[in-house]
Amino acid sequence: MTTTSNNVHHGSCHCGAVRYRVEIDLSKPVIQCNCSICSRSGTLLAFVPESAFVLEKGEDNLTDYQFGKKVIHHLFCKTCGVRSFARGSGPNGPTVAINTRCLEDVDTTRLKVMHFDGKSR
């Protein structure tokens, strides 16, 4: 992971059992998906390569949930239930979907939002 300080953010679940840091460009739009899981959990997602993500704490506190094609690992904290990130595979290899609502120093009302029709896929 490179260390461009203005692009490095820390994230966590609600209880703090799961913590991570991620290098992410939040000047790009985040995705608000209307699929069955994203609409129910209210995520605002930004995707990064796996190399831009470091799980600092809580691997043993994560529970994996998969559905549909089972290509995305929807991970959530088994203590508080928050989905702060997910793991999957993108066109350029392993990727991590960051729930930007779980980034500690980010005001999500200031992010550009792109709507994605995941319900129809």
Image: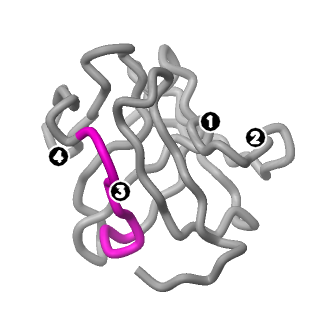
Residue that numbered label 4 is attached to: 71
Residue type at mark 3 is: Val
Q: Are marks 1 and 3 in contact (CB under 8 Å)?
A: no
Is 35 rendered above or below residue 59?
A: above
The magenta segment is 49-58
Q: In the rendered structure, which amino acid carries the disc numbered 1?
A: Arg
Q: Earlier in the sequence, mark 1 or mark 3?
A: 3
Mark 3 surroundings within 10 Å by alpha-carbon count, few (fewer than 14), some (14 through 19), many (20 or more):
many
Give the amino acid at mark 4: Val
Q: Residue at x 38, y 14 (%)?
A: 80
First in sequence: mark 4 or mark 2? 4
* Residue located beneath label 1 in the image: 101
Q: Residues within 10 Å of mark 4 (few under 14, many from 20)?
A: few
Which of discs 4 and 2 lies nearer the camera? The answer is 2
Which residue is disc 3 drawn over?
96
Q: Closest to the observer: 99 or 90?
A: 99
Asked whether 50 falls inside the magenta stretch, the response is yes
Residue closer to the observer: 26 or 12: 12
Q: Looking at the picture, which amino acid does disc 2 mark?
A: Thr
Tell me which corner region of the image, top left, top right, bottom left or bottom right, holds residue 101. Answer: top right
How far apart in space, not on screen, are marks 4 and 2 (Cα)? 27 Å
Asked if residue 26 lies in the magenta stretch, the reply is no
Label 1 Cα crowd, 10 Å radius (few <14 / some 14-19 / many 20+): many
Q: Secondary structure at mark 1?
A: helix
- Relative vertical location of residue 58 with respect to residue 21 in this rendering, above or below: above
Please report whichever mark, 4 or 3, sits nearer to the chain's N-terminal start. 4
* Callout in the foreground (4, 3): 3
Quadrant of the drawing holding the C terminus: top left
Residue count near mark 2 (Cα–Cα under 10 Å), binned few <14, some 14–19, many ≥20: some
